[in-house]
Amino acid sequence: MTNKLFIPIAIIIVGVLIAGVIVYTNYAKSSAEEDEVLSSQEAGEKVLNFINDNILQGQITASLIEILEEKGLYIVKFEVEGEQIEWRITKDGELILPQAIDLTEIEAEPEQPSSLEEFAKCLKEKGMKFYGASWCSWCKKQKELFEEDVEYLPYVECIDEETDEVTAECQEAGISGFPTWKLPNGEMSSGFKSLEELSELSGCALE
């Protein structure tokens, strides 16, 4: 049986833990008095029977590793398809407490870039450049369209903060006003652009 089968089973067990549920079970409850203390072996069997019959339901089987004691509880360590898990059970056998499960084999999905991030990167890939100045209000509005993904814009600052003069790069590009966009065909287009206009000028899809 592969780990693919175990993953949904593990998720079910984790779901019990996340919900903060303490599992109450009368499974195989003996007719003994309520204050009767189970032996460690009886506690282990009760936990495994509960898991095998109610969670795994015959698809695969949990097997006992060891049983320890901890402040009025038994710690029942067991294995399912190579994964070691531990649950706790009260010594009277009334309460089963699921514990954390190691699911390190399940890799977290990488965070997907936002649509604005992808759009800004596409503008750069197409060869577009956004020439602007730090004091330019329309440049600021242009940047605001990209929200937190503004860092991915192919932005060129044209004012040297030390000399307050136009940089050599912007002089060579012939920039005379801000904002100015260099288009994929090499032409310059001045003025603020909406996202839709940038999409049409660049050929980049806007989701």
Image: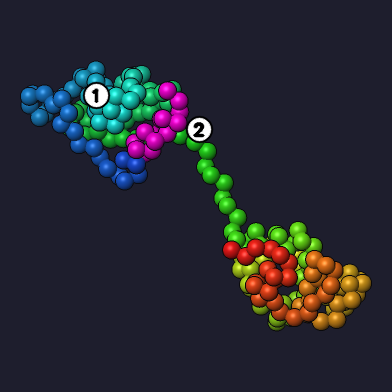
Q: Which residue: 50% across, 32% down?
A: 105
Give residue 162's position: percent from left, percent from top: 85, 74
Quadrant of res 137: bottom right
Query: How would you rate the neighbour count of disc 1 (Cα within 10 Å): few for under 14, some for 14-19, many for 20 or more?
Result: some
Q: Specify the quadrant of the image occupied by residue 163.
A: bottom right
The stretch of residues the image draws in magenta is 1-14
Q: Which residue is mark 1?
A: 49
Quadrant, the N terminus: top left
Instruction: Give the amino acid at mark 1.
Output: Asn
User: How many other residues sit within 10 Å of disc 2, few (<14), some (14-19) or many (≥20)?
Assistant: few
Callout 2: helix, strand or loop? loop
Horizontal side of 172 relative to 147 (left or right) equals right
Mark 2 or mark 1, which is nearer the start of the sequence? 1
Q: Is residue 199 visible?
A: yes
Q: Check disc 2 and report the residue beneath it.
A: 105
Residue 157 in sight here: no
Query: Could you say whether the residue bearing mark 1 is in a helix, strand or loop?
Result: helix
